[in-house]
Amino acid sequence: MPIFGAIREDALLYLLEQTRSVSVRAQEFFFREGDQASGMFVLETGRVTVIKEWRGQQLLRHHLGPGDCFGEMALMDLLPRSASVQAIDDCTAIELSPEHLYRLFKRDAEQFALIQMNMGREVSRRLRATDELLFRAEMVVARGTGDLSRST
């Protein structure tokens, strides 16, 4: 699981002893866009879809599978959920709250920092992919208007 990459076994066990496993049945939601965020999830089994609402329609963003995390922005910015996550299959996930990470920080700041860096890498990876999609969409629009000087 990338979120736990390079984490020592003792720190991982300490963290996992505090967390809980969450089960969500197929077609049910882990959370919905706009919900108050309470933590992030690391998917153990099953698949989920990330959905964004726009103009009253639910639009599929992407699929995630075992080992992937979602809701990590909640641990970083403490803002309401920016998208919904719905189970495609019956799923189990580890729920990780800010309190869990704070306890790890008090116990072992280095291991806490590694998890924070892993979360930052995941957010950065997703931002790069989104930037690329936005760029391609802008180029399609620019070609259609003949204005290739468009920039963000």
Image (cartoon, rainbow, N blue to C red):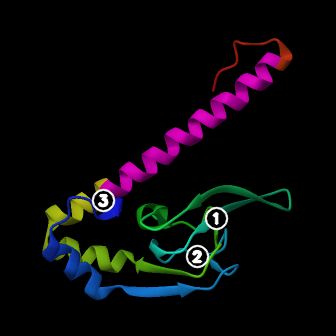
**Label 1, label 2: how many angstroms apart (C-alpha)?**
19 Å
Q: Which labelled disc corresponds to residue 118?
A: none
On the rendered image, what quadrant is the N terminus found in? bottom left
**Magenta span dominant secondary structure:** helix
Residue 80 in the image, given as x and y percentages of width and height: 59, 68
Where is mark 2, residue-wise? 36
Q: Element type at marker 1?
A: strand
Which stretch appears magenta?
Answer: 118-143
Eye-nearest disc, 2 or 3: 3
- Mark earlier in primary sequence (3, 1): 1
Q: Check if residue 3 falls in the magenta segment.
A: no
Please tell me which residue is depicted at 28% across the width and 81% down the height of the picture.
16
Using the image as rendered, state which of residue 31 and residue 7 is in the foreground: 7
Q: Amino acid at mark 3?
A: Gln
Please tell me which residue is depicted at 29% across the width and 64% down the height of the picture.
4
Please tell me which residue is depicted at 66% across the width and 81% down the height of the picture.
26
Q: Check if residue 139 falls in the magenta segment.
A: yes
Quarter residue 21 falls in: bottom left
Please tell me which residue is depicted at 69% across the width and 12% down the height of the picture.
149
Above or below: residue 4 compared with residue 18 = above
Where is mark 3, residue-wise? 116
Q: Which labelled disc corresponds to residue 49?
A: 1
Mark 2 neighbour class, 10 Å CA radius: few under 14, some 14 to 19, many 20 or more: some
Residue 28 in the image, given as x and y percentages of width and height: 68, 81
**Label 3, label 1: how many angstroms apart (C-alpha)?**
24 Å
- Side of 49 where 74 appears, left or right: left
Q: CB under 8 Å between callouts 3 and 1?
A: no
Q: Element type at marker 3?
A: helix
Q: CB under 8 Å between callouts 2 and 3?
A: no
- Side of 26 where 146 appears, left or right: right
- Mark earlier in primary sequence (2, 3): 2
Q: Amino acid at mark 1?
A: Thr
